[in-house]
Amino acid sequence: MKPGIHPDYHPVVFQDANTGVRFLTRSTVSSSRTVEWETSAGLRSYPLVIVEVTADSHPFWTGKQRTLDAAGRVDRFNRRYGLGGHRA
Protein backbone atom coordinates (compact mmCIF):
# COMPACT_ATOMS: atom_id res chain seq x y z
CA MET A 1 0.00 0.00 0.00
CA LYS A 2 1.17 3.51 -0.72
CA PRO A 3 1.79 5.49 2.46
CA GLY A 4 -0.26 8.61 3.12
CA ILE A 5 -3.18 7.98 0.74
CA HIS A 6 -5.38 5.68 2.85
CA PRO A 7 -7.75 6.81 5.63
CA ASP A 8 -7.00 5.90 9.24
CA TYR A 9 -8.41 2.42 9.93
CA HIS A 10 -8.84 2.01 13.68
CA PRO A 11 -10.95 0.21 16.34
CA VAL A 12 -14.41 1.76 16.87
CA VAL A 13 -17.38 0.81 19.07
CA PHE A 14 -20.76 0.90 17.32
CA GLN A 15 -23.96 1.11 19.37
CA ASP A 16 -27.47 0.29 18.16
CA ALA A 17 -29.73 3.25 18.98
CA ASN A 18 -32.79 1.00 19.39
CA THR A 19 -31.44 -1.85 21.51
CA GLY A 20 -28.31 -0.37 23.06
CA VAL A 21 -26.17 -3.33 21.99
CA ARG A 22 -22.52 -2.39 21.41
CA PHE A 23 -19.83 -4.14 19.37
CA LEU A 24 -16.18 -3.43 18.72
CA THR A 25 -14.89 -3.51 15.15
CA ARG A 26 -12.55 -1.56 12.90
CA SER A 27 -13.60 1.35 10.72
CA THR A 28 -12.45 4.58 9.11
CA VAL A 29 -15.29 6.57 10.72
CA SER A 30 -14.38 8.99 13.48
CA SER A 31 -16.35 10.36 16.40
CA SER A 32 -15.81 12.87 19.19
CA ARG A 33 -17.70 10.59 21.62
CA THR A 34 -15.77 7.86 23.40
CA VAL A 35 -16.61 4.79 25.46
CA GLU A 36 -14.62 2.52 27.77
CA TRP A 37 -14.31 -1.08 26.49
CA GLU A 38 -12.86 -4.03 28.40
CA THR A 39 -10.17 -5.87 26.41
CA SER A 40 -7.70 -8.60 27.29
CA ALA A 41 -5.13 -5.83 27.82
CA GLY A 42 -7.42 -3.97 30.23
CA LEU A 43 -9.87 -1.09 29.98
CA ARG A 44 -9.39 1.04 26.84
CA SER A 45 -11.13 4.08 25.39
CA TYR A 46 -12.53 3.86 21.84
CA PRO A 47 -14.57 6.21 19.63
CA LEU A 48 -18.33 5.58 19.95
CA VAL A 49 -20.59 5.72 16.89
CA ILE A 50 -24.36 5.37 17.38
CA VAL A 51 -26.24 3.87 14.44
CA GLU A 52 -29.98 3.49 13.86
CA VAL A 53 -30.02 -0.14 12.73
CA THR A 54 -27.72 -3.12 13.28
CA ALA A 55 -28.24 -6.86 12.94
CA ASP A 56 -29.57 -6.77 16.51
CA SER A 57 -32.58 -4.62 15.56
CA HIS A 58 -33.08 -5.14 11.80
CA PRO A 59 -36.36 -7.00 11.06
CA PHE A 60 -34.66 -9.41 8.65
CA TRP A 61 -32.15 -10.61 11.24
CA THR A 62 -34.52 -10.61 14.24
CA GLY A 63 -37.19 -12.69 12.47
CA LYS A 64 -39.85 -10.00 12.89
CA GLN A 65 -40.05 -9.27 9.19
CA ARG A 66 -43.53 -8.88 7.72
CA THR A 67 -44.49 -11.23 4.92
CA LEU A 68 -46.29 -9.62 2.03
CA ASP A 69 -49.27 -11.32 0.42
CA ALA A 70 -48.13 -11.10 -3.19
CA ALA A 71 -51.04 -13.10 -4.63
CA GLY A 72 -53.58 -10.89 -2.86
CA ARG A 73 -51.92 -7.78 -4.20
CA VAL A 74 -52.04 -9.07 -7.78
CA ASP A 75 -55.75 -9.92 -7.47
CA ARG A 76 -56.51 -6.51 -5.98
CA PHE A 77 -54.58 -4.80 -8.80
CA ASN A 78 -56.52 -6.77 -11.42
CA ARG A 79 -59.87 -5.91 -9.77
CA ARG A 80 -58.97 -2.26 -9.41
CA TYR A 81 -57.76 -1.71 -12.94
CA GLY A 82 -60.16 -4.12 -14.66
CA LEU A 83 -57.83 -6.49 -16.46
CA GLY A 84 -60.51 -9.16 -16.47
CA GLY A 85 -61.26 -9.67 -20.15
CA HIS A 86 -61.88 -6.41 -22.00
CA ARG A 87 -58.79 -4.78 -23.40
CA ALA A 88 -58.47 -1.56 -25.32
Image (cartoon, rainbow, N blue to C red):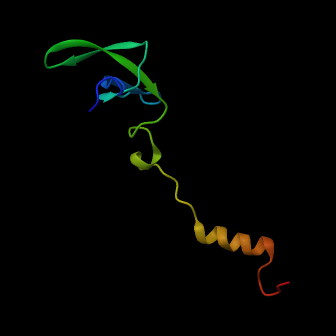
* Image position of 63 (left or right of 67): left
Between 59 and 32, the residue placed more toward the observer is 32
Between 27 and 79, the residue placed more toward the observer is 27
In percent of width and height, residue 42 lies at 16, 13
Seen as rendered, the residue at the extreme right is 88
Seen as rendered, the residue at the extreme left is 40
* Image position of 18 (left or right of 25): right
Q: Quadrant of the N terminus?
A: top left
Q: Quadrant of the C terminus?
A: bottom right
* Residue at the spot 48% in from the left edge and 51% down from the top edge: 65
Image position of 47 with respect to 56: above or below: above
* Residue at the spot 41% in from the left edge and 25% down from the top edge: 29
Residue 8, by quadrant, is top left
* Residue at the spot 36% in from the left edge and 27% down from the top edge: 5
Seen as rendered, the residue at the extreme bottom is 85
In percent of width and height, residue 49 lies at 42, 22
Residue 83, by quadrant, is bottom right
In percent of width and height, residue 13 lies at 34, 23
* Residue at the spot 21% in from the left edge and 12% down from the top edge: 43
* Picture mark count: 0
* Image position of 88 (left or right of 10): right
Between 23 and 21, the residue placed more toward the observer is 23
